[in-house]
Image (cartoon, grey):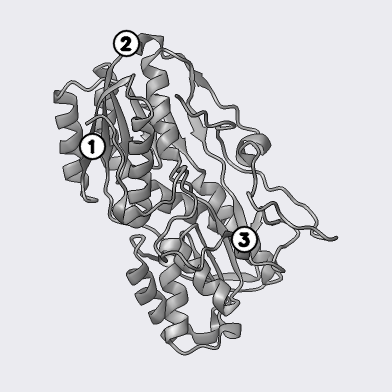
Amino acid sequence: MKRLLTGILAASLVFVFVGVGGAWEPNEKGYQGAPRPFLWSPVVNKMVDTMKYKKNPPYTIGFCNTSISNIWRVALLHEIQYYASLHKDLIKKLIITDANDDPTKQIADMQSLIQRGVDILLVSAGQSAAMDPIVTRAMKKGIPVVMVDRRVTSDNFVSFVYASDLTIGRWMAQWTVEQLNYKGNVVLLAGMAGASPAEERIRGAKEVYMQYPGIKILDVQYSDWSPAKGKKITAAWIQKYGKEINAVTSLHGLQGWGAVEAYLEAGWDPKDIPLQTGSDLNGQLQLCHKNKIPLMIIHFPPIMGGAALETCLDVLQGKTVPFMRQVRNNLIVTKGYETKSVRADKYVYQEVKMDAPGDLILSVDFPFPYDAHNFKVDYPK
């Protein structure tokens, strides 16, 4: 039975400015509406006619993955496998490749999938520019391509399923600016150089920070979405800048977890640790909640994998699909740290799971307890 992902469309963000006054408590389930970037954006999203790709099932789907090098990417893979298990009537085989973050290998993986005669390609591009020619070549051969999480530089694909990285960077920066009362020093802890989520989040954050002359960006470093590398970079910043840093803009919870650990292991009093941002990694929330460190996170839901798998099925059935398809995400803030522009969908204390592993991704969508290390599902192989 097909699980419908409602309200999934896309574009960029125009901020929602709301007041915080009055007694108010967010819903424990968080925001349940349509994606806000779509509702507030002036950009018109186009719909794609896919009748030329229509085929009779069952289908062979090739998933060309950049890697499972961090726990979020593992969760994305698990969402794709889970949704494939729900559609055994339509899917003959789901072939999965892993490039281990090597662009050359990912190109070779794509070529292999094309030669194996897949009906459609689902692609998460490690390096946007590097993967663009092979994706374009597949489309010219008549093999439809659906992008998930990371797109290529051109528009030579059928649909892109994602959560807006530009939005994430903007929201994090806007919250930080307002918490600092428009004056202070920030550092940006980014993902992997050349990957579209990392570059878009940096761009979104800088777009906001540059609007405020009182905000100074001390440094921007890439962490490869590694808690260990995020910790190492932050430790070096602590040595170099000390209390000059007023906020750490971690553009995902993976490196954000390491950033908080660096401050705690350096012996800082929690009340002196700068503002933190991140995403839906339990470990970062656990440390910030336990130590009362102000935190703002935005979900980057791996459920986009499930939405992308279902988009592939829609394409092969000749259904019209959106060119840009966005999943909704929740905005989480430490209670008492909302701003005039940033109001929580949930508070940190409602989101965190103190008795669960730190490497748990909180925004997965399974009807059963999720353990990334022992996940098993029967999907068509």
Given the image, on which type of amino acid does mark 3 rest?
Gln
Q: Nearer the viewer, residue 143 or 154?
A: 143
**What number is the disc on residue 55?**
2
Q: Which residue is drawn at 61% across and 65% down?
A: 349
Residue 95, given in percent of the width and then of the height, sits at 22, 32
Q: Residue at x 44, y 51 (%)?
A: 369
Q: Residue at x 69, y 67 (%)?
A: 335
Q: How far is the residue under mark 1 from the one under mark 2?
A: 21 Å
Q: Which residue is drawn at 38% across and 29% down?
A: 86
Which residue was labeled with disc 1?
A: 96
Q: Eyeballing the image, is 171 above or below 51?
A: below
Q: Quadrant of the C terminus?
A: top left
Q: Eyeballing the image, is 48 above or below 224?
A: above
Q: Which of 152 and 27 is in front in this view?
A: 27
Given the image, on which type of amino acid does mark 1 rest?
Ile
Left or right of residue 257, residue 114 in this image: left
